[in-house]
Image (cartoon, helix red, strand yellow):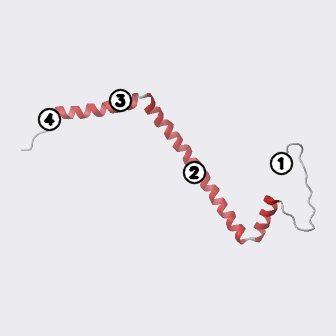
């Protein structure tokens, strides 16, 4: 017949596990730090989703610039303020402090 585990060893394991759980719950830094880290993870996941959307948009724009001459011209006009020879540019300033 195999030896039976002693009852005292089970109580020791239960008491140790309970003490560890109690220490985590009562530690002022443990529980609050866990909540703070969970909030930080949630924020980082939201930021990652935003960055993924931005990367997808930039990829679409890059493909359009490679394959579409109209898109390339539009980007040159908007971002670099290029004009064709002979075109007249009218600048309408909204007032002091307006963006160029």
Q: Is residue 35 left or right of residue 84?
A: left
Q: Which mark is residue 39?
A: none
Q: Position of residue 50 (x, y in %)?
A: 61, 51
* Residue marked by disc 3: 22
Q: Is residue 88 left or right of residue 55?
A: right
* Residue marked by disc 1: 99
CA separation in Å, label 4 and label 1: 81 Å
Residue pushed farthest left? 1
Dot 1 or dot 3, earlier in sequence: 3
* Residue marked by disc 2: 48
- Tell me whether the residue at label 4 lies in contact with that at label 2, contact meaning CB atoms closer than 8 angstroms: no
- Please rate how many residues cluster around mark 1, counting C-alpha atoms within 10 Å: few if below 14, some from 14 to 19, many from 20: few
- Tell me whether the residue at label 1 lies in contact with that at label 3, contact meaning CB atoms closer than 8 angstroms: no
Q: Depth-wise, is mark 1 or mark 2 nearer the camera?
A: 1
CA separation in Å, label 2 and label 3: 35 Å
Q: Depth-wise, is mark 1 or mark 3 nearer the camera?
A: 1
Dot 2 or dot 3, earlier in sequence: 3
């Amino acid at each position: 017949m195999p030896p039976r585990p002693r009852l005292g060893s089970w109580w020791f394991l239960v008491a140790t596990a309970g003490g560890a759980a109690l220490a985590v719950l009562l530690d002022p830094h443990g529980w609050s730090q866990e909540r703070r880290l969970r909030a930080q993870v949630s924020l980082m996941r939201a930021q990652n989703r935003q960055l993924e959307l931005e990367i997808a948009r930039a990829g679409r724009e890059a493909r359009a610039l490679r394959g579409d001459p109209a898109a390339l011209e539009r980007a040159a006009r908007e971002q670099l303020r290029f004009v064709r020879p002979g075109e007249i540019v009218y600048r309408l300033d909204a007032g002091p402090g307006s963006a160029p």
